[in-house]
Image (cartoon, rainbow, N blue to C red):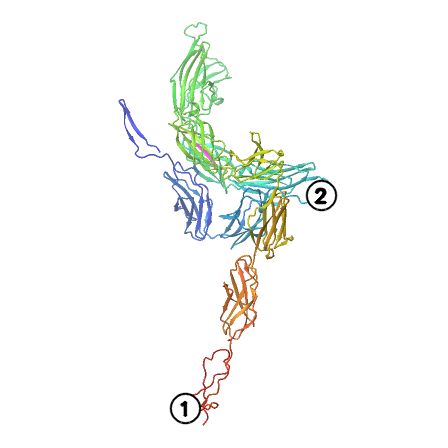
Amino acid sequence: MYFFRILAENEYGVGLPVETTEAIKISERPLPPGKVTLKEVTGNSVTLSWEKPDHDGGSRITGYIVEMQGKNSEKWTQVMTVKVTEAVVVGLTQGEEYSFRISATNEKGTSDPRPLSVPVVAMDVVIAPAFKLLFSTFSVLAGDDLKIDVPYVAQPKAAVTWQKDGIALKETTRVNAEIAERHLYLVIKEATRDDVGKYTIKLTNLAGEATADINVIVLDKPGPPTGPIKIEEDKLEAPDIDLDADLRKMITVRAGGSLRLFVPIRGRPTPEVKWGKAEGEINEAAQIDITSSFTSLIIENVNRFDSGKYTLTLENASGTKSAFISVRVLDNPDAPANFRVKEITKNSVTLTWEPPLLDGGAKIKNYIVEKRESTRKVYSAVATCNKMTWKIEPLQEGSNFFFRVLAENEHGIGLPAETLEPIKISEVPQPPGKVSVVDVTRKSVSLKWEKTEHDGGSRITYYEVEMQAKDQDKWSLCAQVKSLDTVVTNLVQGKSDPRLLANPVVAKDLAIQPTVRTKLSTYNVQVGQDLKIEARISGHPKPTITWTKDGSALKQTTRVNVADTLSIDICDRNDAGKYTLTLENNAGTKSAFVSVKVLDTPGAPQNLVVKDVTRNYTTLVWEPPLIDGGSKIKNYIIDKRESNRQGFVNITTKCSKTSFRVGDLTEGGVYYFRVMAENEFGIGLPVETEESVKTADPPLSVGKVTLTDVTKTTASLSWDKPDHDGGSRILGYYIEMQPKGSEEWTIATVTKTGEGTVTGLSSGQEYLFRVLAYNEKGKSDPRPLTAPVVAKDVTIEPSFKLLFNTYSVQTGEDLKVEIPFKGRPTPKIAWMKDGQALKETTRLNVSSTVTSTVLKIKDANRENSGKYTVTATNNIGTVTEEVGIIILDKPGPPVGPVKIDEVSAIYATISWEPPVYTGGCQINNYIVEKRDTTTTNWQIVSATIARTTIKVTKLKTGSEYQFRVFAENRYGKSTPLDSAPVVVSYPFTEPAAPGSPIIGYHLERKEKNTIVITRNLVTLQWAKPQYDGGSAITGYIIERKKLPD
């Protein structure tokens, strides 16, 4: 940001200023956005994304303009303005074709647009799932992390399932599967040999399904050889290379990804293994591992230069075997080849080029042509074309331009091919000035001429001298020179008429000492302008002229003309210095000195060094530029650039010293830095760090150090990883030891894991131990073992370190129970189940090492449930621990019989007991079904019963029913418990008949009763029935019958 002011001056002094009222920001329009990508298309919308511009023009990007053009329209319509690099354009018409382009804006205006490379038809796209696997086999060192990237395509979004060795993948805090847009990830932290296997991925959507297999290999110490040891003759075996089908094809990997080549080998004796590359050297960062059974080559963060044919050669006493693996890295293309300027006119330039040598593994789609005025720092787009030649017009005559061409493939825009020096837009020069004859001899003539008044906009490269004999019409070329004079020789002597000299001449040599006087002693010239140093000289004979600069003789070039007058075209900063003009003849020597200052921006600072790198800051130190541009250095400008970005970001513009501490860096980040000096004429050339700088510290100290074992000659230690790696990966650990009585610590061993064994100890000697972690930035502080160690065989009572008391596994899956133990001598391990010695089978077996015992159960079923006891015994003692194993399965059937608690004409109440085997988890509910015994069809009564009883209603009176009950948990439902058939009816019968009605006297008791009989009423009385049918009498029915007359 700048303020400007102007002051007038007269003979009495400087007047009052007029100032700009607001600060002026030095900036320009941004460059176009980067590559535009079509992310998604539907019947009425399109989703686009794009990259930020390479340069924001010196002012923050305020937004992006998205424009659309219909197929048959010439008009571009602005559809939206967004602040992010992604947009969703809606409201499209199904089946219509559209073109899109994106422009960036800042406060200075709008950039040139960047179009989407192909038109888009608005339609719902259905894509069957498909994988884009680069490899099918991945290897990782034990203890390291592995992240497998599986690119895929599917539209609409596909459902994903993972399996390991045919069984659904069980995700844990260490192993999990992740899903992102068009990428699946399998993440394994701190890999172990249990992670080895075949992982299967299945994608499913309405368009179909796809399956892919991935093999994971964990590189670790081998298990013990399989015994017994057999004594055989040592046979020779020729080397052999087992390349799988994937490695025989072209291996394709994206730039920035990892190249992993794992090749099984064999041969006896073990062959010598050599990796090579047919076209050049293998990347210095490549990791090559070699064992007796395999070799691997791993290159992280690959780029286009890692493409090519890799050769693997095995050699032993039995012969030689070779194989090659072709690798293609998908990357942006390299710079176009043989880029040159074909033709220049006064208002145009024609460029030509050839395709890049490295196309990035994809076809070149087009080329981007850009130009830049020599006074500006930012390129602007000229055209995007499919040809390898382009004419740029109109251009301003006399202007200087840089030009560049970039190739683009489907992966992005590649490196540029640029003109190394500015191209001046010019035409044919005007004729030279006055031509004079300096001297004539019988066979030669000396000529000189004045410089042409106009060079056509470009510096004069040479002069052609032609001659014509008298009485001839033809001119012939006799000289081609760069200076303003020449001597034409081999002329034919001629004879003229004589003329008498007016005065007599004394025959003697005339000698005059040279003299010289320059017009100015100091010349100030603006960069890009022409310089002319004029001098008046005399002497006889004519003195020889020599020009030197800073003690070195000046040479005649197309830009520098060395004569009486020294002229330099288009001055640059390198023309500044002290010039000396020396005249010499036989009468003496004379010199004159001239100082030339070229007013320009300064040169690049010198000797940029990075010091004191930590995890969030670093210090830069440099020296001032050798060329200050004729003006005092005001300050330095410091920029930084992350290694994965192309553009630099400013850190400060007001550094007045030749050192600067750069803070607020991202821990573990990789940076480049550059420094530029600034004087009153502007910002000079940059000096950049040649190598990247990674911000990191040495790691913190390791965690607690533990003595895991000691003998009379060895000591084994283990420790926890540091809480922080300093921002850079831990490369390994040093174990240092100090014998008692010594003050010197020595490195005993180096290891890459969190444990190690020191060998070669002296029996009975006392030692101190300590452990240090190290990364590429250095060593951590040491962490000592808390107590000294005496090298001797010790006895330790057995003990177990139980991680869990209970283990559960789903039926059909495998279970591994590993229990670490201690003891010296190594204890004997015994397993029991439910009080009985454990019987090993092909499905259940036990294995033990010197530090742990492992119980393995394959295809677990409910018979494997129970209480297991493990015992460790040595001559010091015995220890026993119990482990419960639960097999998660469907429950057993409920306990019967099914009880019929109550039966009525339309319902029945039944009950049962819970199952003896619950499947290792809680019973969620019971399912009750009913069946009319006249059919075979079962009907669900209820599937959500929580208790062990239910009242079954809506039954048909008189029908016979059978009931059955299932128990259900989270893993399924049990086999049923069936009831006996039951008839649905009332629980009572019809009552017996009541006693006969009585009218008048009671026949037996002869008593007069109270029965009343009238002409229209009779009172009856009767006895209760002797049997009520099992239920209380609820009423009587009285009937009458009319007798005939």
Left or right of 177 in this view: 655: left
Q: CA distance from mark 1 to mark 2?
A: 124 Å
Left or right of 292 in this view: 56: left
Q: Position of residue 529 (x, y in %)?
A: 40, 25
Label 1: which secondary element: loop
Which numbered disc covers residue 222? none
Residue range of the region highlighted in magenta in the rendering: 399-405
Question: Residue 146 colored magenta?
Answer: no
Residue 509 showing in the rendered view: yes
Using the image, determine if residue 585 lies above or below residue 68: above
Which numbered disc covers residue 230? 2
Q: Magenta part mainly helix, strand or loop?
A: strand
Amino acid tagged 1: Ile
The crowd level at tag 2 (other Cα within 10 Å; few <14, some 14-19, many 20+) is: few
Label 2: which secondary element: loop
Viewer-side residue, 463 vs 490: 463
Q: Position of residue 53 (x, y in %)?
A: 43, 39
Q: Position of residue 946 (x, y in %)?
A: 50, 63
Q: Which residue is mark 1?
A: 1013
Q: Which residue sits furthest right?
A: 233
Q: Position of residue 608 (x, y in %)?
A: 46, 28
Viewer-side residue, 491 vs 698: 698
